[in-house]
């Protein structure tokens, strides 16, 4: 048994009924945290509602000697998100950790995507993360005892072609995490983003897994103990939520397999300048051989060196 690194802390984990969120909730319970297991119980498309996934995780945490309660909020609903935070405070008297994992998919190419498909994904990922973080931050600002905020982004933020809504939401969550780090640092709150890699219900929908899923053998059901196991993400997230990580904020981490990657912040790559407004003729002359030298045209491929796109 590991040490109780999160002993006495209270954590909310959204999307905690399955996949990556489930692994995080289970490990945090094992590490001594009181866990509010929040899961709407919907399909990957966000359809339906089921209490079973959240209830099962709660039972497992309690069976291991931990403390946990279930919540079935739709985090994209502002009032339900407030009630979720209120439940943690009423049940355990405090809130130390908020991990926003909940999400859905609506995959389409940009020219086929409907307005509703765009809105639904933005609503759950971006607004849902805003909703829970908003109410948690009110508590943290009032109490001024610190806190840990984790926002789940994705490698899709690098430009997944068939997921413009998901890519936009996940890229937005990197900026959201940095903004919260800057705003909440004075209250002892850290805010970081996770770009995970694992086999989940979301990745089962990927091209390489569709046939296996149709045949009743989805990847996400046969990865325990491998580099694709969603549980691999939980240890680093738990460390970020510990007292030892009080100095780590505003950063983005890739967590996949048995490795953790620290992503560099956006930095200038090249620069050209003029001593006044650029003369248009001079810009056309200079830019191709300086700023744009060696750049390739669009190919439809993901950028070289970009991580494999996975869902969260």
Image (cartoon, rainbow, N blue to C red):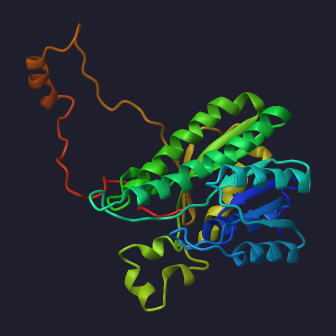
Judged left or right of residue 290, residue 87 is right
Viewer-nearest residue: 149 or 123: 123
Q: Position of residue 192 (x, y in %)?
A: 62, 44
**In this rendering, is residue 275 above or below 34?**
above
Viewer-nearest residue: 226 or 87: 87
**In this rendering, is residue 271 above or below 152?**
above
Residue drawn where x is 61% and y is 52% of the image: 128
Judged left or right of residue 280, residue 162 is right
Q: Position of residue 104 (x, y in %)?
A: 52, 64
State the count of labels.
Answer: 0
Residue drawn where x is 53% and y is 71% of the image: 44
The quarter of the picture where residue 245 lies is: top right
Judged left or right of residue 271, residue 178 is right
Q: Is residue 307 visible?
A: no
Location of the N terminus by quadrant is bottom right
Q: Is residue 81 visible?
A: yes
Q: Position of residue 199 (x, y in %)?
A: 52, 73
Location of the C terminus by quadrant is bottom right
The quarter of the picture where residue 257 lies is: bottom right
In this view, which residue lies farthest toward the top?
Answer: 275
In this view, which residue lies farthest toward the bottom?
Answer: 215
Q: Position of residue 53 (x, y in %)?
A: 70, 76
**In this rendering, is residue 263 above or below 274?**
below
The quarter of the picture where residue 10 lies is: bottom right
Judged left or right of residue 216, residue 292 is left
């Amino acid at each position: 048994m590991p040490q109780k690194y999160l002993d006495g802390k209270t954590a909310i984990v959204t999307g905690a009924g399955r996949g990556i969120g489930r692994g995080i909730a289970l490990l945090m319970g094992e590490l001594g945290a009181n866990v509010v297991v929040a899961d709407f119980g919907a399909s990957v498309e966000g359809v339906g509602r089921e209490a079973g996934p959240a209830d099962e995780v709660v039972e497992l945490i309690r069976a291991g000697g931990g403390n946990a309660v279930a919540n079935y909020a739709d985090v994209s609903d502002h009032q339900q998100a407030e009630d979720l935070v209120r439940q943690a405070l009423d049940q355990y008297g405090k809130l130390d950790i908020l991990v926003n994992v909940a999400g859905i998919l609506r995959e389409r190419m940009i020219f086929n995507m409907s307005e509703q498909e765009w809105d639904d994904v933005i609503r759950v990922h971006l607004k849902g993360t805003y909703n829970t973080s908003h109410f948690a931050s009110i508590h943290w600002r009032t109490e001024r005892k610190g806190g840990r905020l984790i926002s789940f982004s994705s490698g899709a933020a690098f430009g997944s072609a068939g997921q413009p809504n998901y890519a936009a939401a996940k890229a937005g969550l990197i900026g959201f995490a940095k903004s919260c780090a800057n705003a909440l640092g004075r209250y002892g709150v850290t805010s970081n983003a996770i770009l995970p890699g694992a086999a989940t219900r979301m990745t089962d929908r990927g091209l390489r897994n569709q046939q296996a899923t149709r045949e009743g053998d989805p990847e996400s059901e046969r990865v325990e103990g491998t580099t694709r196991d969603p549980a691999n993400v939980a240890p680093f997230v738990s460390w970020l939520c510990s007292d030892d990580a009080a100095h780590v904020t505003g950063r983005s981490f890739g967590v996949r397999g048995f490795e953790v990657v620290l992503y560099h912040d956006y930095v200038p790559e090249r620069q050209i300048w003029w001593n006044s407004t650029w003369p248009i003729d001079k810009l056309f002359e200079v830019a191709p051989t300086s700023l744009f030298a060696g750049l390739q045209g669009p190919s439809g491929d993901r950028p070289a060196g970009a991580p494999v796109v996975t869902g969260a």
